[in-house]
Image (cartoon, grey):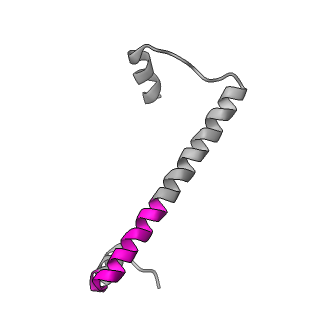
């Protein structure tokens, strides 16, 4: 049986305070791990670009903003 998000929220509301605190800590830990993984993958991508001389360096703020939109 698949639990919907709303069902999950309702179940969390039923938990006692200690379990909610533990769940909060676990979620924060999982989010931090996911962010670290994202940063690491971005690092690997940038490293490959650097190895292929594909990195672009620029100090013009308007050009940097333009590059971020791409």
Q: Position of residue 50 (x, y in %)?
A: 67, 27
Q: Residue at x 47, y 24 (%)?
A: 67
Q: Residue at x 65, y 23 (%)?
A: 54
- Magenta residues: mostly which secondary structure? helix
Q: Is residue 18 above or below residue 24?
A: below
Q: Nearer the viewer, residue 5 or 13?
A: 13
Q: Residue at x 66, y 29 (%)?
A: 49
- Return the residue found at the far top: 60
58 falls in the magenta region: no
Q: Nearer the viewer, residue 7 or 45?
A: 45
Q: Position of residue 64 (x, y in %)?
A: 44, 21
Q: Position of residue 39 (x, y in %)?
A: 54, 45
Q: Is residue 54 above or below residue 25?
A: above
Q: Left or right of 17: which side holds 57?
A: right
Q: Is residue 52 above or below residue 12?
A: above
Magenta-tinted stretch? 13-31
24 falls in the magenta region: yes
Residue 49 seen anywhere in this rendered image of the structure: yes
Q: Left or right of 36: which side holds 15?
A: left
Q: Left or right of 67: which side holds 37?
A: right
Find residue 43 and report its image quarter. top right
Find residue 22 and report its image quarter. bottom left
Residue 7 seen anywhere in this rendered image of the structure: no
Q: How many marks?
A: 0
């Amino acid at each position: 049986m698949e639990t919907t998000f709303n069902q999950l929220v309702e179940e969390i509301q039923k938990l006692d305070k200690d379990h909610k605190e533990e769940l909060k800590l676990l979620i924060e830990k999982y989010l931090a791990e996911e962010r670290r993984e994202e940063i690491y993958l971005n690092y690997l991508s940038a490293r490959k670009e650097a190895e292929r001389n594909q990195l672009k360096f620029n100090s013009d703020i308007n050009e940097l903003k333009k590059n971020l939109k791409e």
